Image (tube, rainbow, N blue to C red):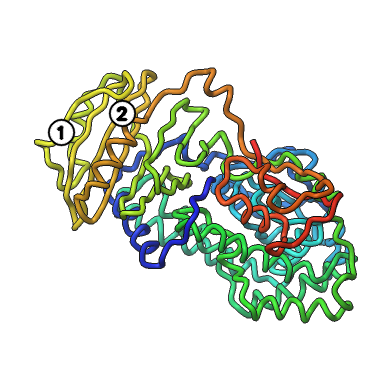
Amino acid sequence: MALVAGSVSRGVRERRKRLATACGLMLAAALLAGCNSLMNAGSIGPNAAIVGKDVSSGPEEHARIVAAYGGIYHDAKLEQNVARIVGRIVAASDQPDQPYRITILNAPAINAFALPGGYLYVTRGLLTLANDSSEVAAVLAHEMAHVTANHAIERQNKARNAVIVSRVVTDVLEDDDGRLALASSQRSLASFSRQQELEADAMGVKTIGRAGYDPFAAARFLATMAAYANYRSASGPTLEKAPDFLASHPSTPQRVEFATKAARQFGAPGIGDRDRDRYLAGIDGVVYGDDPSQGYVRDRTFIHPTLGVGFSVPDGFVIDNTSDAVLATGADGTALRFDAVALVKGADLGQYLASGWVNGLDESSIRRFSVNGMPAASANASAKGWEFRIAIVQAPTGATYRFIFANEEATKGLDHAASLTVSSFQKLDQQALARLRPLSIKIVKARPGDTQATLAAQMRGVNRPQELFRVLNDFDPGAPVPAGTRVKVVTD
């Protein structure tokens, strides 16, 4: 996901969250299938590395997690990398006979977690952020420690209770797509107590130290995650995403200090294996950010290759491709939500707007027009202290898309954003689609004279590339890059 440069005040962030919520209040149950990262999933796919004997518990939870995180990421080289790390730390753990089934989740979120029965998960987002095998080992050993200490059983029970409560809520709201149940169960996966986290930290550091990995990797990766979170927050809030690892494992000074203290039991910094070059070779070519099958963002444009559609937002807007829909927020407080609705091809779009799903609709404002040869309709609404601009566009295939703009006031920015964005909506031809390339991690070797700036100049499709380069490669600002050093860049 491309991020927009510039800091955003806390007040503006909170306002953006409220605006996105206001847009959500107006939606019917239908969601954009193409932007939705959820998919039906059953057993573990062929790319899931299995360590130890077969396990039988947790298939229901496994299917739910795979669905919630965009499916399984297929990359044989990456699987072998992770399987090697897991095999090494399992052998050094307090329970070397415990079998683990490893799944790489196709999500850009920074996350890893485990369930009872030996189900262990890590996202490709976390794997692209890590810089060596010892950092991944630290994260996975931490999660394995939760299972060993029975923390995961407590969390699993909380998840089940959250789903039951949410199902009652969704029944009352007639929200039969189960979004609230899924959201609550995801949140419950990120809820260990402070004491449990510290206990897992200590056990994880002990395990990777025994395995011969750098025991200081845990503290190092906590700091990297904090730097990445700061990079992202400078561009505004990330809305309605799957919970990430840092949200449940905050990189507080106390936690970094605790992990560093545990590591010192093995010796001074510099000991242990990092296995950096082999690890970087294993993540070369891995998709970075949004998966193209779910649509992705380039600067101010959202593109969905599978659906063959795209649109652009005005300057100053931040686009966020969430699990439910595409969201965008502008500097003036205008918020956008883009999703889809199931309508019959050729349906009267103006009649759909007036069908009762929009509270406070001004029926006199309904207007029928065309957007790049496609039938469209728009209307204004006022409800619960918000001003809305709504537009519906039907593609030649019959797929119908919905834009909802909201602001606390009927500003010029609201009308401008609605007009500009909707008019940019278009079907992409095959030639344009063929030119599109997803972002991925590329490993390059620094040449004599290279600096952070020259290497960051190779980045494509991201904002503030120098800052992201530093975060991805764990460099301090201004630090030299010795010739021959392998580094990560993001490119298409």
Q: Earlier in the sequence, mark 1 or mark 2?
A: 1
Image point 36% across, 50% down: which residue?
330
Contact? badges 1 and 2 (CB < 8 Å): no
Residue that extends furthest to the left in the rendered view of this protein? 364
Q: Position of residue 319 (x, y in %)?
A: 44, 46
Residue type (three-letter) at the residue carrying disc 1: Ile
Query: In the shown orientation, is residue 339 left or right of residue 90?
Result: left
Taking depth in this image into account, of 169 and 338 the one nearest to the observer is: 338
Q: Position of residue 321 (x, y in %)?
A: 47, 44
User: Mark 2 = which residue?
Assistant: 393
Image point 61% across, 60% down: which residue?
228
SS label for mark 1: strand
Give the Cα distance between marks 1 and 2. 13 Å
Q: How would you rate the neighbour count of disc 1 (Cα within 10 Å): few for under 14, some for 14-19, many for 20 or more?
A: some
**Image height check: is 459 above or below 249?**
above
Q: Position of residue 265 (x, y in %)?
A: 85, 81
Q: Quadrant of residue 313?
A: top left
User: Mark 1 = which residue?
Assistant: 366
Q: How would you rate the neighbour count of disc 2 (Cα within 10 Å): few for under 14, some for 14-19, many for 20 or more?
A: many
* Quadrant of the drawing holding the C terminus: top right
**Image height check: is 305 above or below 112?**
above
Query: In the shown orientation, is residue 482 left or right of residue 101?
Result: right
